[in-house]
Amino acid sequence: MSDPKEAIKERSMVIQKDMLANLFTELSNAKKNGKKVVYTFVPGNLTELILAMDMLPVYPEINALQSGMRKKSGGYIKDAEKLGFSEDVCTYVKCDIGMMLNGNIGPTGEKLPEPDLLLLSYTGCFTFLKWFENLERLYPGVEIAMLHTPYQEDGVITEDQVKYMVKQMQEDVIPKMEKVAGKKLDYSRLEKMLGNAAKAEDLWVKVLETAKNRPSPIDSYFAGVYYMGPLNTAFRGTEEAVLYYEELLKEVTERMNLGLSPVTPEGEMKEEKFRLVVEGPPNWTNFREFWKIFYDMGAVIVASTYTKVGGLYDQGFRHEPGKPLESLAKYCMGCYTNLNLPQRVDLIEHYIKEYKADGFLINSIKSCNSFSAGQLLMMREVEQRCGIPVGFIESDLVDPRYFSYANIKNRLESYFQMLGQRKVILAQEEVSA
Amino acid sequence: MVIKIQELRNQLNTVSNEISDAIKSCFKKEYLIIINEFCDCNHVLSILLIGNCGIINSLNYQTLRIKLHKMIQAAERLTSLLDECKTLAFDLDFTYAKQWKAKSRYRLLVGYLPIYVPREIIHAANAMPVGIMGVGDRKQIIKGDAYYQSYICHLPRGVIEMALDDNLNNFDGFLFPSICDCVRNLSGMFKLAKKGKFTRYFDYPQNFEKHIGGTFYRELIETIIEDMFKINDMKIITSHLNASIALYNRNRELIEQIYDIRQEFPWRLSAVDVYHIIRAGMVINVEKHNEILEEIVGLINEDFGEPMDNIRVIVSGSFCEQPPIGLIKSIEMAGCYIVDDDFMLGSRWIQGNIDNTTHDPVNALVDAFLQKSAPSSAVYDVGNPRSARLVKQVRKRNADGVIFCAASFCDPALLDRPELQKACDEAGIAHINFQFHENTGQFKVIKEQAGTFSDSIKLWV
């Protein structure tokens, strides 16, 4: 395995990098500037509410994945294990706790501020609940607000569920946020932000749908995790995010019109040989090596489920300024990991057909039962319904001990050989027909 | 009068052959074998002691015979009940439940996974709630492993294996309480595999305000009532639900009585016996279970058995995937009386009685969940930390230590463990921990660990 070269970045990535740098600078000065800080999660996040009250969000999952990409997570995880956390449990949690034990230094090298509020938006992942119970004990006395998002167990969002969530927001979550922020929620400001969110969501969907083109101008998984960043985290609801997605769409459309393949860290991909749909989060500790295995083989991810953990906008959901709390409730309940297994299989089937994929691949994550439990049945079901080759690899989010490059490469190469062989057979059948 | 066992033993050695022969002449040979088996029993020893003191001469042999006969009958009955419970607890074909259902076309079977569901509503709908607690080490997993990666706990593999092997045929519905993402997704697997006429993820509210979380919970209960009604057309009426609540109140009372008796006299029943007794209650109707419990409580209220020089521990963290029986046995054999545990937490979830006299019993069930739930890793605990509740439980049970015993890959238990250990440290409570799979077959290390724990407490604490 050779050392990865310096990554080649698209324009939008540079813009996003600046947005993030500004956010982290703001965070490092938060206490000095009297800004309140809210720790919260990505799926089902209430970013517009946080921003509308002039508070700053911090996402422990993002800290963890960035620690993974910066090769810090291994040490952090071991420190958490020394504290008594089992090897078996979620490595995001252990990485985050380890990071705190080591001074809570963020990706810019500056200390992240301690939280003024822990906003537990408990969407699609039971571990979130345990995570914030642990954080509450690490920051004794901190205000904590819990928003329980009911699971779409029956494959629909019911009116009762919406009411339950709205009541929690009105009577518990928002009053606690107001108390910490020291100000009342300005609903007109919130509505404006939700309007901005909807605009950015429209643009994001258009970006995602360019992958229906052949060749796809984007990789919806490896590049997709960068593209989804502003919308899934601290920028949804801002004009900045709208501008970012306008720029991204422009850039992607240009590539599409020129018939270009996605940009990879080593430049433009030469030829699109395989179109894949991928289920499951990526590995962060060896992200570039992982991606390289795909682009070296001419494999493009045309749709992924992971990029829907922050919302299923491509299935029609939009934040609605006219119904602020109801739409926030529906948003939380509509995130990918809050869907039941039949819904997830239906969505994958839809992607395979809509994006004309050659194969379906699962990257099963040791740490993430929300994604992983049941994936083998999902795989069988998809194979049966779509009749395409399916592949299965295993890794972890941020624990480098569970990324075996040789094993994954070996398995993927065999999978791509199978896909290649199938293409040859299909072509022969087409000729003889 | 407290008679020390060792003193009794010493005096027993001096019992004259004449008296022994007299006793022997009163009973058939097989009873003598039982007497020998129960020779540590205080009653037998007391009688023999009395005889040695000469009082026997004034006793009517007939009275003696009746006393001993009753005692032997009690021992036989207890043994028989324990055997019955043992068989029921691990009947993975759920024979009793299926036979119960076969008696009427209006009867339903509703399977539920750990931890808690309000069984009262199922019972009131002319259905039997049946606990699906995994296969333990009683069934070889072949197909189930093909559905789960190596890093996922063992319980769902066994459940899928049972579903694919038709063990769960004749079940009308399945409830999957919100314990963790594995059980949540298992509900989806059942939906995909089209098992049962209904499958529900039982999403406990994590908000405990009556008009918020309570309303949500009530709607959840009503959905399940509706699911059952669609199948058997049986409407739940208030008096029926109140009667069901009363039955389950009694069930919990009796279970607590067993724990209370064991707290004081842990040698009267082993932890394995208690485990079988309570697990049996998850696969039979509550009426029958209450009868069994009533009898057992009556029998163990009598003084028998001999205390051993064991420490007293609470086992924590095994509320979902169940430890193998060998593991529970190993802990006790290593010198630790298990005076409390969370093995069958669902049966003991509501702490105290639920009001069974109201015109709105569903509301009573909601209130009970919101106000009387046991501490659990499945429920958001800020405001009522389970660490403090564990320390309180240790004090209440007069335990010497805690054994954290969680299933491998059990996120809820394992993510709670550091905080619970910290609370124990702060309260000066000794603790150890280990992990298991439901089909763990080797207990030597666990026995050694528990034995060392026991010795260290006996020697140093």
Image (cartoon, rainbow, N blue to C red):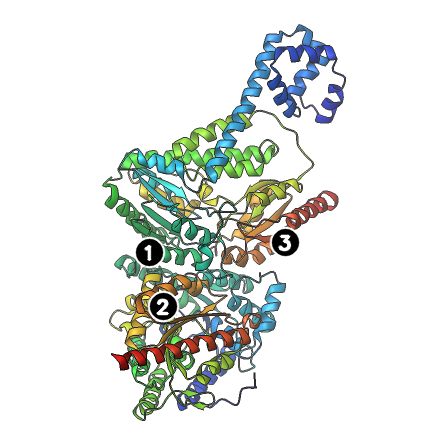
In the picture of the structure, the residue carrying the numbered disc 2 is A336
In the picture of the structure, the residue carrying the numbered disc 3 is B426
> Disc 2 vs disc 1: Cβ atoms closer than 8 Å?
no
- B418 left or right of A384 in image: right
Q: Amino acid at mark 2?
A: Tyr
> Disc 2 vs disc 3: Cβ atoms closer than 8 Å?
no
The spot of residue B33 in percent (x, y) is 63, 21
In which quadrant of the rendered image does the N terminus of chain A lie?
A: bottom right
Q: Amino acid at mark 1?
A: Lys
Protein chain holding label 2: A
Secondary-structure class at tag 2: helix
In which quadrant of the rendered image does the C terminus of chain A lie?
A: bottom left
Q: Report the Cα–Cα distance between label 2 and label 1.
A: 18 Å
Q: Report the Cα–Cα distance between label 1 and label 3.
A: 46 Å
In the picture of the structure, the residue carrying the numbered disc 1 is B191
Q: Which label sits in the foreground, 2 or 1? A: 1
Q: Quadrant of residue B248?
A: top left
First-in-chain label (1 vs 3):
1
Protein chain holding label 1: B
Residue B357 visible to an observer of this rendering: no
Residue B51 visible to an observer of this rendering: yes
Q: Quadrant of residue A299?
A: bottom left
Depth check, front residue: A322 or A330? A330
The spot of residue B98 in percent (x, y) is 36, 38
- B263 left or right of A291 in image: right
Depth check, front residue: A101 or B86? B86
The lab-note entry on whether marks 2 and 1 share a chain reads no
Depth check, front residue: B92 or A311? B92
Q: Which label sits in the foreground, 1 or 3? A: 1
Q: Residue at the spot x=43%, y=35% of the render?
A: B251
